[in-house]
Image: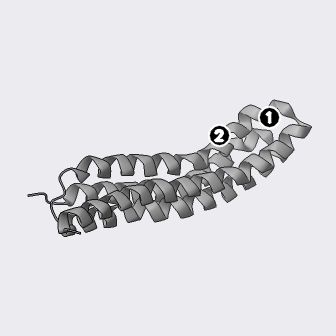
């Protein structure tokens, strides 16, 4: 396999890794508050609006991974050697790992927020604020991926 082919494979692998790992973080992360919210809604369906944001918030990491994959895919056609492909693979890693881990942990924080809403519905935004603190690291991972992707020099 030529350096060009290996470079393209590495870049494509990086794009896939960004989307898949961040997506897995969101899938797992949404599961925690969704299960908790279903229990709360069985007792009080009127709390749906207060719980909705807490349930969907861990889904943002999947979107960040998709955006990163899209940016990397946009550069695949420019890859001319193994080094460029490796750089794009490594550019994907920050959002891949921060998306995976922050999605899972944000889901746990959101599940705690659901419990807060169950007992004190007017305090829902406090749960969202705590969850947003975890979100910060996914955003930082996306930014690092963005900057690394844009720093690859193509000939």
Coordinates of residue 57 in the picture (x, y in percent):
60, 45
Q: Is residue 136 visible?
A: no
Real-space Cα separation, disc 2 to disc 1, in angstroms: 11 Å
Q: Nearer the viewer, residue 127 or 31?
A: 31
Specify the quadrant that holds the C terminus.
bottom left
Coordinates of residue 100 in the picture (x, y in percent):
53, 61
Q: Disc 2 or 1, which lies upstream in sequence?
A: 1
Q: Is residue 67 above or below residue 106?
A: above
Give the labeled residue for mark 2. Answer: 53
Coordinates of residue 8 in the picture (x, y in percent):
26, 59
Q: Is residue 102 left or right of residue 4?
A: right
Tell me which residue sits at (58%, 52%) in the image.
Answer: 26
Q: Which mark is residue 18?
A: none
Of all residues shown, which one is farthest toward the front? Answer: 1
Give the labeled residue for mark 1. Answer: 47
Tell me which residue sits at (48%, 45%) in the image.
Answer: 63
């Amino acid at each position: 396999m030529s350096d060009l082919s290996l470079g393209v494979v590495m870049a494509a692998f990086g794009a896939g890794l960004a989307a898949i790992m961040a997506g897995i973080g969101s899938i797992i992360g949404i599961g925690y508050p969704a299960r908790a919210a279903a229990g709360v809604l069985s007792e009080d369906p009127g709390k749906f609006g207060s719980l909705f944001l807490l349930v969907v918030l861990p889904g943002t990491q999947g979107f960040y991974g998709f955006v990163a994959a899209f940016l990397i895919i946009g550069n695949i056609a420019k890859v001319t050697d193994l080094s460029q492909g490796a750089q794009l693979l490594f550019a994907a890693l920050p959002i891949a790992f921060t998306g995976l881990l922050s999605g899972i942990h944000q889901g746990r924080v959101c599940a705690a927020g659901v419990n807060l809403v169950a007992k004190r519905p007017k305090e829902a935004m406090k749960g969202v604020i705590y969850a947003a603190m975890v979100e910060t690291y996914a955003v930082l991972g996306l930014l690092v991926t963005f900057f690394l992707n844009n720093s690859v020099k193509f000939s």
